[in-house]
Amino acid sequence: MVVAETLAGLALVNSAVKGIKGAIGTAKDISSIADDIDNLFKGTKEVKQKAHPIASKWDKFLGKTLGESADKFSLGAIAKETIEERLAEEQLFKVRQMVNLRFGSTTWDDILLERQERIDQHKKEVEDARRKKNKSKQRVYKILETIGSAILVIGSVVAVFCLIIFNMKK
């Protein structure tokens, strides 16, 4: 992964936090900062999921004493990844505190709970759609199998009938 992509995830987290900080005091309800919260989750997810195979400033700094390594197993890359994850978690914690202070002590937990319920509902809907699609396929195969069997039986009957007629003429 390119360093710029990692920085983009962290920048998304930071810009979302700034947007939330700016809007939290004037917001009448949580929906006015919903996009910033979405960006916060998206940026945090990007930072957590991405590996950092390219050497960073940390790799250069630590590489001078421990040896150069520009792969994802280098101490610098691991340190960079860990620090970026902690920074994202720290920003997430700050937003949690701001939202809870402004809208009530359980608002953030309610948001996370509702998000998880929606994710679970979406997974269930996708699984149901997949199951329906498979059931439809099985139904089509069963119909084709029945039609094929019928054609085979009719063809066999016609073949036997033709053999009988040809044998009677001789």
Image: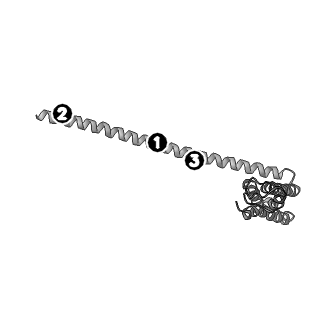
Residue 81 place in picture, x, y as percent: 78, 55
Residue at 44% x, 42% y is 141
In terms of sequence position, does the residue under pointer 1 or pointer 3 come before the other? 3
Q: Earlier in the sequence, mark 2 or mark 1?
A: 1
Crowding at label 3, few (<14), some or many (≥20) Cα neighbours within 10 Å? few
Residue type (three-letter) at the residue carrying disc 2: Ile
Which label was assigned to residue 129?
3
What amino acid does circle 1 point to? Answer: Arg
- Give the residue at x 85% y 54%: 93
Horizontal arrangement in the rendering, residue 145 relative to residue 43 (left or right):
left
Can you say whether 159 is above or below 85 in the image?
above
Q: Quick one: 10 or 97, which is closer to the camera?
A: 10
Q: Position of residue 3 (x, y in %)?
A: 74, 63
Q: Which residue is mark 2?
A: 164
Residue 103, position in %: x, y?
Answer: 85, 56
Callout 2 crowding tier (Cα within 10 Å): few <14, some 14–19, many ≥20: few
Tell me whether the residue at label 1 lies in contact with that at label 3, contact meaning CB atoms closer than 8 angstroms: no
* Left-right relation of 107 to 135: right
Please tell me in which quadrant of the rendered image residue 164 appears.
top left
Q: Quadrant of the N terminus?
A: bottom right
| Secondary-structure class at tag 1 | helix
Q: Which residue is mark 1?
A: 139
User: Mark 3 or mark 2, which has the lower sequence index?
Assistant: 3
Answer yes or no: is residue 72 visible.
Answer: yes
Q: Secondary structure at mark 3?
A: helix
Return the residue found at the far right: 101
Q: Kindly check if marks 2 and 1 are in contact, taking CB atoms under 8 A apart as contact.
A: no
Residue drawn 83% across the image and 65% down it:
18
